[in-house]
Each structure stands twice: as structure tokens, then as C-alpha cells.
Image: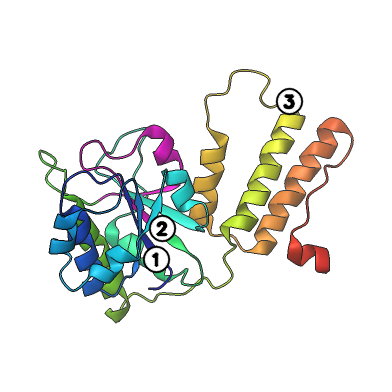
Amino acid sequence: MDNIYIILVEPIYSGNVGAVARIMNNFRFTHLRIVGSIPDKNDYYLAMHSEDILETAELFPDLGAAVADLDRVVAFSRRIGKTKPIDMSPRKTAQYVHQLKHLKIGLVFGRETFGLTDIEADLCPLRCHIPANPDFPSINLAQAVAIAVWELHGYPIEKDYGLKAIPHAASMKDIAMVKNYMIDVMKDVGYFRSWEHTNWEAFFDKLFHQLNPNKTTLYRFRQMFNRFHVLVTGKGKGYPLNDEESQD
């Protein structure tokens, strides 16, 4: 699972980061990213025989920077509700991840006290919820990571899932280009003239994360939105070519 990145957002309590490093080592995960400060001495104490994970952990000033180079991002959260829908369980997350082994995937865990801010949550198109006692749903940070990596590590050994990989799912770079094109078309045709309550960037991010489109599907979205542009403005809208397309 060398494509998986465990991301901790501003961990607060001493020792949690070290416990996370140890459980990552137990299940052969090596990529740790931390939004905030470096681990303290208690983290190294609890990371017994896993100190190298702490020493090579990447530090970022904010979550946006921590996920900027990733293709898919899943946030683990205890909060549920109309504005915080659940997309998958830990088992479904494991299935999702194992179908996309060629892509870089981030698993985000929020602060122990209040989790992620709304802005940070919008950077995570998919949400995983660990079912627990509804009267006491808050799970310790290190234990939440343990549940996640255990599910991911154990998933391939099961024989009855009928798992099929999605080898041609597009990268986040390709998805972002098409998403931005679609939003630009919406602006050009006057879609945003009145007050718009929907966060369309977050909507498209979630849509594409769930769909896992290949490049052909992305091209069809471009084609469809370009047609919308023609019908409303009378002309097509150019699309910036990426490096591969410019060489074709």
C-alpha cells in the first residue's frame, strides 16, 4: 500500500502521533503527513521500533498543501447529518482504495477536539464514518487510524469480494482540469448571475471521486459542456491541452 498517505491535521494530545506511527508500521504503511508541528518526545516513546516513520514524516502548514499532490482524498469523521453525508464505511473505504492502487490516496484524520473545519472538510470529497456508540461516537485518533489501516491491510486476504481494479481511473490533475473547465463554462453562460447556494467545486470533486472516470469519460464531460457553451453563447470554448495531449 505504498500509494496511501495518512494525514493528521494538527494533532493535539501528546503521544497520539507516536501511536499512529507504530500502528502504521504494524500494517506496513510508511507515508505519514502532519499538518502542524513536529512530534514531541512522547510521540517517539510510543512509536517504539517505528521512529523512522516519524523522522520521515512530511510537515505541511495547512491541509490544502498536504493534499495538493494526491489523486483521491477521504476524510474520517464521527460527524453525520444532512450537510455531512456518509459516503462509505471503513470496509468500503478499503475496497475503494484497493481498486485504485495506481493513484495516490490520502486518508485524513482531524483534530482530537473538533475534527476538521468546514473549509478543510471541503478539501476531502469523500467521507468515511466508523460506526460506534451513538452516545459516545468520538474515537481516539490513534485508534481511528488503527481501524482504518487494519481494514486496508486485511482486505486483500478475503476471498469472496470479487474485487475488480480500476486501472485507468484518471488522476486528480486531469480531473481538476476538466472540473475547472466545467465551472468556467457555467460562469460564461451566466449560471452564477444569482446567489448560488451550492458549492459546485466541492460537488464536482465528490462526483468525480465517486465515479472514478477514465480519460474518455472526462473528454465526454468536456464535450458536453462545450456544447452547452455553443448553445448559449454561439461559440465553443477552448480547452488547455495537457502535456500528453499536446504531443498527440
- Give the image quarter of residue 24: bottom left
User: In the image, which residues are magenta?
Assistant: 106-129
Q: Is residue 107 visible?
A: yes
- Which mark is drawn over residue 4? 1
Residues under numbered marks 2 and 3 in contact, where contact means CB atoms less than 8 Å apart: no
Q: Residues within 10 Å of mark 3 (few under 14, many from 20)?
A: few
Instruction: Tell me which amino acid carries mark 3.
Output: Gly
**The residue tagged with tag 2: helix, strand or loop?**
strand
Mark 1 or mark 3: which comes first in sequence? 1
Question: Measuring 28% from the left and 81% from the top, which residue is drawn there?
Answer: 157
Disc 2 from disc 1: Cα separation: 6 Å
**In the rendered view, does 151 fall on the left or right side of 221?**
left
**The residue tagged with tag 1: helix, strand or loop?**
strand
**How far across and how far down the image is residue 220, in percent?**
71, 55
Q: Residues within 10 Å of mark 1 (few under 14, many from 20)?
A: many
Mark 2 or mark 3: which comes first in sequence? 2
Which is nearer the eye, 228 or 64? 64
Disc 2: which residue: 106
Residue 114 colored magenta?
yes
Instruction: Tell me which amino acid carries mark 1.
Output: Ile
The quadrant of the picture occupied by the C terminus is bottom right
Q: Residues within 10 Å of mark 2 (few under 14, many from 20)?
A: many
Residue 124 colored magenta?
yes
**How far across and how far down the image is residue 3, in percent?**
43, 69
In the picture as drawn, the residue positioned furthest to the front comes out as: 41
Disc 3: which residue: 190
Question: Measuring 35% from the left and 66% from the top, which residue is drawn there?
Answer: 56
Which is nearer the eye, 162 or 170? 170
In the picture as drawn, the residue positioned furthest to the top comes out as: 194
Instruction: Tell me which amino acid carries mark 2.
Output: Gly
**How far across and how far down the image is residue 227, in percent?**
80, 43
